[in-house]
Image: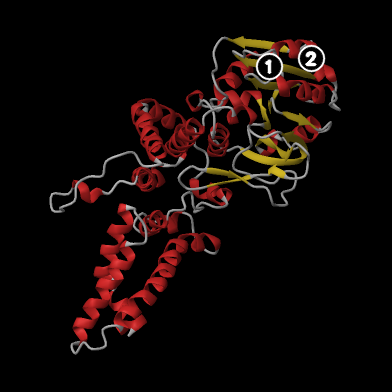
Amino acid sequence: MDFVSIIIVNYNGAKHLKRCLHSINELDYPKEMVEVIVFDNGSADNSLDIVREVCRDANIIEHPENLGFAPPHRIAAEAAKGNVLAFLNNDTRVDSQWIREGTSVLDRSEGIVCSASKLMTWNGKRVEFNGGTLQYLGYADQLTANDLKAGDEILFPCGGAMFIFKDVFREAGCFDDDYFAIFEDVDLGWRLWVMGYRVVMAPDSIAYHRGHSTLDSQKDAKKRFLMHRNALMTIIKNYDDDNLRKILPLALVLAVKRALLFMNIDKKGFYFWENQAPKTGIPPKYEEGCLHLAALDDVFESFQDLERKREAVQKNRRRDDGELFKLFKDPFRNIMGYYEYLWAESSLFGKFSLEQIFDCGGEYKKRIDEGIWHAEKRLEALQKVAHKEMLSRRDAVDGTAVKRHLLGAFSRGLLKEGPSATIKKTAVYMTRNLSNWLKYRIW
């Protein structure tokens, strides 16, 4: 039987800790085979008083400042006595079989070194995590509707309720300290697979979650900054050389594209050959655009450290990327709803051979086609407007003049589709290149 060290990272979590610790006290697992370690990130509430009251034998590690989620697990792991580490969010409560079911699927002989619990909402009515997906740019999502069985393979665990052998956690380099929080579990899971290990679901190991209570207390922009920055760091560290050469340029270009779209930048204002002046004032989503650029800058500033970390990951590579991509589940999930972003992204897939990398048949191919589908839907709507213009020119004798007028109407209609500079640029491009499309669809 495994000796399990339960590690709970806490920051001002007094209102959650009591229920969490009570559920640990009620576990159906020998008490002499469990230890509880609470790492406190400089809480200003009475969190530690509650720990001492409810779980008197807990090992409390106090730190004067908030180190986030990732570094405390490394520090606590060094102090842990157990051969298995169990990570648990402070805003959870666990089923009595949580440890038994979570550790039952671990099997060193089969390379299964890490397992993920099923996370439910607090009332137990909905699933929060039962496996996950990874978008090719490093953005993870949680699966809530699937029928994964005990031992089914997943790319990464959820750090809110998971189990891992202590020696493997340390061998893999623990959670990356620089992540602070968000996607550190995704990065760890990906690294474990690269190293030749396996990560599996333990759906009968159940934890009930209040839902990102600690993170939700922080400013949204700060969370999104970490999400964008950490996603980029994850792909830089973990893709093999060939795939990183194809995907990293695309990731950088699309990050800038998202920033410009959110900032509503009209690049024509900076062109010598255009008469308009740059726009002034701050648009509503300016901060959203800035955080994309700040995330990029953070990655650039830490690139030397990232290269060192990447070298360590690739040195321990025992498994090709091609073996892992099936675990991404949904690599072409749309991460941004702007139609012009979808057009730009889908137009680049072929140039970077992504359809070959991820073998995008079936659902994957549909994701790529969504950008084209949206474009065609808009064109159909504009076709009706342009057709009305055409009918109003029945008195025209020269058919070429009618076509020219029609293209002009089409362009004007597309220009009105949105304020974005990308929409306007796309309008010019389509007007120049879709005369044949108009000819066959309308005439």
Task: Determine whether, in the image, residue 260 is placed left or right of residue 238.
Answer: left
Task: Please say whether residue 238 is visible from this viewpoint.
Answer: yes
Number of numbered callouts drawn: 2
- Contact (CB < 8 A) between labels 2 and 1? yes
> Residue 306 versus residue 192: which sits nearer the camera?
306
Coloring basis for residues = secondary structure
Q: Is residue 135 above or below residue 57?
A: below
Q: Give x and y (percent) for residue 392.
A: 29, 83
Q: Amino acid at mark 2?
A: Cys
At which x and y percent is residue 239?
45, 41
Report, in whole angstroms, how far the alpha carbon at label 2 lies from the one at label 1. Answer: 10 Å
- Residue 92 location, quadrant: top right
- Number of the label disc, if any, that sits on residue 38: 1
Relative placement, left or right, of 105 versus 254 is right
Figure check: 75 above or below 356: above
Tag 1: amino acid = Val
Apparent side of residue 22 relative to residue 171 in the rendered image (left or right): right
Identify the residue position indicated by label 2 in the image: 55
Q: Residue furthest left?
A: 272
- Quadrant in the rendering for residue 441: bottom left
Q: Nearer the viewer, residue 208 or 304?
A: 208
**Quadrant showing the C terminus:** bottom left
| Residue 275 shown left or right of residue 159 in the figure | left
Q: Dot 2: within a 10 Å radius of its alpha carbon, few (fewer than 14), some, or many (20 or more) residues?
A: some
